[in-house]
Amino acid sequence: MHIAYDVPDWTKGFYQDQAPVRKCARPWRMAHEKKSDVAVLLCHGYTGYPGELIRPGIDLYDAGFDCYAIRYPGHGTSQRDFLKSDRRDWLGTAEAAYEDLQGRYRNVYLAGHSMGGIITVILAARHPQVKRIALIAPALEMIALQSRWKRIQLAFSQLCFPDAVRVPWKRDPAYHFLYEGDPDDDAYLGAEYWQYMFVRKVWQLNALAKQARSLLPSVKADALSLSGGLDAAVCERSSVMVEQKPLGVNKHIHLPNATHLIPYDKDQASQDAGMRAIVDWFTR
């Protein structure tokens, strides 16, 4: 695996984390000795981290692309950092990374998982020179916020709920990761992030999703979107919306046995099919 961690600090000008970045959460690159003409910028999801996108990085690198994975402020460090960061920091970091790569490569393609998918949509709308994007379970419409009533409830909840509300979470050993990390990464990140619902941050996520939905019809890039039949977080309609956008050549692939976590899905066949689809989309 040709991975390196000497990437530019794209978080400059945005929230600066106080806690150390976990090894698994370091932004990374997989770049060929002879620079490729095309770079792929990979954007992780809400409370996620760059290590989750190692598998698409490996496959795209092997297909000839230079790959870069960003880390948003507040992610992969601590709950305190997460609560101090917001959507402007997350989106701004992605924008800075894109602009840096766009200045160094002939073309930059975008790939994003979950919240990274909606950030990808926003970037593609802002930068019409982007030719191709791949969206992995893009969080354009979330199951928990599918109805107007649920969104109204969230709006009121963020005004009166504490910053973090504990929710059930336990590690699932069926998921296997490819990143180089600390032995207790999963337990640490679970305790800092995944054992809690961050009501105000979900509201920020919803605002990003709303922005992406409004911009989707203006996205000129050819778009591939993947959905999972066992996804408990994002509606399949998110990918249908992408396929139906009026501009570009667009495709939706539904993976019936996939969860929300397609880049490292515990169903290996779904993971392989999803990654193969992304490589085929970017190399066609």
Image (spheres, grey):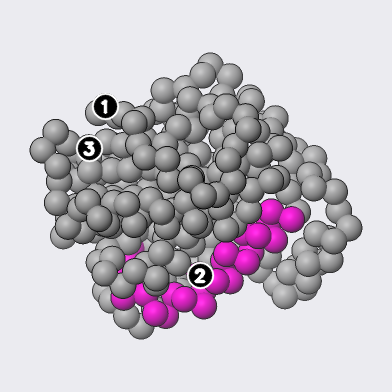
Real-space Cα separation, disc 1 to disc 2, in angstroms: 33 Å
Q: How crowded is mark 3: few (under 14 residues within 10 Å), some or many (20 or more)?
A: some
Residue designated by label 1: 1
Real-space Cα separation, disc 2 to disc 3, in angstroms: 29 Å
Q: Is residue 109 left or right of residue 195?
A: left
Tell me the amino acid under the disc marked 2: Ala
Determine if the magenta segment contains residue 209: yes
* Extreme-right residue of the structure: 160
Q: Residue 212 carries which label?
A: 2
Above or below residue 63? Residue 4 is above
Above or below residue 157? Residue 17 is above
Tell me the amino acid under the disc marked 3: Ala
Q: Residues within 10 Å of mark 2 (few under 14, many from 20)?
A: many
Q: Which quadrant is home to the N terminus?
A: top left
Residue designated by label 3: 31
What kind of secondary structure does the magenta stretch mostly adopt? helix
Q: Residue 125 is drawn in which quadrant? A: bottom left
Tell me the amino acid under the disc marked 1: Met
Magenta residues? 200-224
